[in-house]
Image (cartoon, helix red, strand yellow):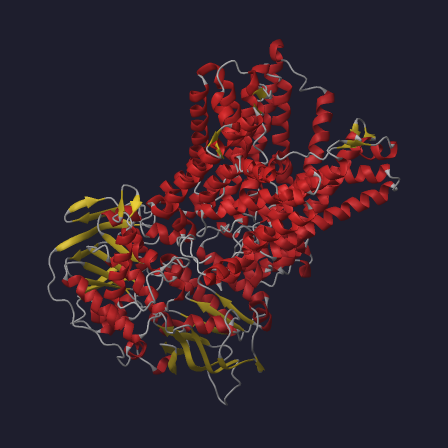
Amino acid sequence: MNSRVVRASKSALSVQKAFLAIVVVVIAMALFNVNPGTKSEFFTELNFVDLLKSSSIFLILAMGETFVLIGGGVDLSIGGMMALSGVVVIMLINAGVPIPVAIALCLLLGLAVGATNAFISVYQRTEPFIITLGMGVVLTGIGEQLTNAHPVSTGDLNFQNIANLQVLGPVPVLVVVMLAVVGVVYWILRSTSFGRNVYAVGGDYEVAKYSGINVLRTKAATYLICGVTAALAGVMLASQLSSASSIAGDPVPLFVVCAVVVGGTSVAGGIGGAIKSTIGLVLLGILTNAFNMLRIDSLVSYLPTALLGVIIVSILWLDSYGRKRRRESV
Amino acid sequence: MSSATEPIVGRVSSQRAINLLRNNPIFVAIALLVIITSLVEPKFLTAANFDNILRQFGTLIFAALGMTFVIMAGFLDLSIGGIISLVAVVTVTLIDKVGQGPAILIGISVGLLCGLINSALIITSGALSQAESLFITFGMSLVYGAVALMYVQGVTQFLTYSTTDISIFNAINSGGIGFLSVSAVLFLACLAVLYVIERRTYLGRAVVLTGGNKVAARLAGIPITRTIVFIYAVSGVMSAIGAVVLVSRVTLADPTMGTPYTTQAILAVVVGGTALAGGRGSVLWTVVGTLLLILLNNCLNLLGVSSYIQFVLRGVILILAIWLDRVKQDSVSK
Amino acid sequence: MVVTSAPQALLSINDVSKAFPGVRALDQVSLEVFGGVVHGIVGENGAGKSTLMKILSGVYEKDSGEIVFEGHVIDKITPFESMKLGLAIIYQELNLVNTMTVGENIFLGRFSELGGRAGVHSKARTLLQSIGSKVDTYKLVSELSVSDKQMVEIAKALSFDSKLIIMDEPSSSLTADEIQELIQIIHDLKSKGIAIIYITHKLDEIFGFCDVVTVMRDGHVIATRDVHDITRNEMISMMVGRTIENEYPPRPEAVGETILEIKGMNTKKLRDIKLTLRKGEILGLVGLVGSGRTELVRALFGADKVARKSVFLDGKPITVKSPIDAINFSMAMVPEDRKLQGLLLGFSVEQNISLAVLARLTKRGFIDAKEEGAVSDRQIKALNIKTPSGRTKIRTLSGGNQQKAILGRWLEMNPRVLILDEPTKGIDVGAKYEIYLLMKKIVEGGGSIILISSELPEVLHMSNRVNTINDGRINGEFDPSIASADEIMAKAFEFA
């Protein structure tokens, strides 16, 4: 049997677990709908579009993070970067800077941050987890300083339209942008030399090095990409809400990392992909949405958050455990 | 510093003093900081300010002390923020039900429990590297924080609304034994215990051996599993004590109050000189590191720097500290 | 191979030397390799074969000498450049990215040159077919058998248009059928004019399909001969015989009854190990690198997980699941790689020595510092460890003294069973003799030693008994005072 088909279906199998989970959640929600006591607005068009919109932002973030994780690193500054970028773009627009210029500046900011992350983590060989964590703190702090911890907003309609203009029925531009980003990342990872090199560097650093791949530059590039996508996500979010706040929240990067891991990327590097990350994120997104929709009795209204945390830890734990089993196979 | 296990105190000849200064730029940094600040802002050298500084040796120092062993063993505990939040809300909400003494004890047990859960997860997952333990404890931070939120439904619990006796908390906040505040005494007691453990006990030695070379230590019969349980248990308990002190200070328990302490604690440990990779370090150094951070805070406040910029600076210092630590590592291993 | 006039050598190695701290890996090595010739290289562990290959492929840099490949002098190249020049090497530990496909591995880093996915996979398929391999290029490397992985490596070498392919012990993990396939491929390559350097322990392979053989020993080339001009015995003698530089104390005499018995032990590599150890004896374990010697002792010591283990101490079954258990049963192990597995470099000599007996030095949780110092001083004196004091950082000591410190760590325990894995590696002659005397003292005191060493004379002179291990199985037992080195080595080299 053509191994290509076999392999495709095998990887679909692992993603199938996430797929299956999605199906389970949807069915569960449908069942809940039967009972008026637990009926929710899960299946409304409004909710679906909302889900799509909020997932889009996370997906854009996830695409950049996928690059970094496949390459064997990690970037936890994306939360702060997203927040700062949103704040900066709105402040620039309010100051009269033309929209395209403002957006370009933000993306450049993302590039600069990514470059800094790359420099310290890759070229100086420090632990990227802490470095990017610290960077996230720095970016959040800068954002707070700039806004004095108050959310900033803009009335500029043109800017709002960037994300919110509805082009395909009720589907806004934001989703189109997201699809474009996913498509581009998918293409890069699958069909370009650079993309394949990222897999090589993450899969086996030494072998990649001995094969003439410039491992440092490849890894650095993943951080650059991640910085830019985080900045883009910030701009899109600001456009969607026509406001921005400096508090991105700590869970954002972790949520994204876990979504990507759920989809089939490992924090150790070497495997993963755009589609896989998308499925992982969709699953977590639906889960969160379902939890919120169920509006369980106020006594345990934070339960979903806790459960989400447990799920996240379980995923990470399984990732490590899987590696342990493979290591010790006798 | 010459060795993690050679005492710093002792007959300090001028040569040793010079070496100490040269090997530890942190002392120079502290000296500089003191000098510069007192020049710019004379209020720095007042007794009131000193008192202020001493008072700030609060929650952070406890969290940082607990973090020290974890880092010395070559691991990381990123969940302490969540643990502090959880312990705070649990303790305060239980005061009216069981009285302050038992409430505090239960709170500390919660901290211990969290630490044990952390260690169990790390051991069973076979996490070999520091990186893997990072992710898991980071995730647990989310869980503990969420449990804290759940427990009080997001509502801040005020100590002052309590109907029962809260004298212990008051004492921790404002009481005194001689010229030291109660929390200072608590800190010194914890420091003493931890220092003795670190220098003189088997477990303390196991901690630093594990960080030095886990493979060699294991092959020589060091119980790695037990060591891991120990470090996270200590971290959990110390975070819990820190939470109690924090609650006493601000007279409330907010389910997210612990969040900033995680990175701060790591910073205090690394700045103090304990190597992030493990195998070298001491709780004493962490005290010095915390002192530097507090001084920095104090100076920045006196100089009128906005709190947000301070926030940024902390992130920058964290990055710099880790970077320099890596540079130091590389030069040592050559 | 018919040679009329002397053709230009494809590869000329002239007087190449390379030293590592404490060890002369290569000493004025010279040899020539010609196109279309299968050139075998044999030698014991430590003869210098892999060092030479790593210099050729650019992983190491030679200290002196000249290397000429296809008329060009080669100096200071990277592995990638070496591949591009046409010099490919296939390592024992295969150099493939497990998480990627076959096709991509063959063209790792050259994706765009071949027009993307389709181009890469079609060219890869062509290359694989040219060596008769039917491996699917879309398969992940992690899913392949070792034999298939080697095919991929060969295809990779061919993709660089290699003129010389070095194969480092390629058949060690192959079945008999797979080896036949490999031999066929080698003949094909040969007929295309490609030169093959074939490193092996299996003498039958040399006689089976090599044209020329070079015998190395202790970093020297002993001889390069046409395969027809040399006999098996001559080869073994060349590999093993040497001027005896070391002195050895006389073998231990009083050997008692069996104290330790392994009735069966299985891991991925080890197959049904059976071994006995008697009181007061030194048991030598002789085998090639990769035969399972270290795996055996590690499994015994509880350092690794095993599938099945049946061990008896004093006739009673014992369970050893971790080094802590082993130590409790009075077993000790000096590991193979002292830097990675033995030394705690950032710590003092004293702290390194006290390590194994730390529990004994602990009373009610507290370490008795004075007693620790006494232990350390005792071992420093007994082993003649050269160090300014016990509190000096062990990093500053010489290799020999570091090894002694590790030995001291275990000797302090007075173990009943002491496992020594390459105890005198990288140690000068004088220190070696001291260690031999120590070993004798241990067994005279009633302890027993399992000795693993790549230095055959060492094992033969020190052991009462020798077990040969081959391909994960104990396949022979000898009395070294009677059997000859050649006999023993022949068993270790046996074609499994």
Q: Is residue A77 visible?
A: no
From this view, report whether residue A308 is shown above or below residue A32: below
Residue C396 or residue B48, whichever sits in front = B48
Quarter of the image for residue C251 reads: bottom left
Q: Position of residue A196 (x, y in %)?
A: 63, 53
**A43 on left or right of B328:** right
| Residue at the far bottom in the pictured view | C5
Residue A155 pos. (x, y %) = 86, 30
Give residue B289's position: percent from left, percent from top.
Answer: 53, 47
Q: Name the quarter where the N terminus of chain A is drawn.
A: top right
Query: Relative to residue B64, is residue A35 depicted above or below?
Result: above
Image-based side of C175 in relation to B278, left or right:
left
Residue C295 falls in image quadrant: bottom left
Is residue B104 in view? yes
Q: Nearer the viewer, residue A280 or C314?
A: C314
Can you say whether A103 is above or below B87 in the image? Answer: below
Count every numbered label the image shows and give the total. 0
Indicate left or right for C54 with A73 as reference.
left
Q: Where residue B64 sits: x, y (%)?
A: 50, 41
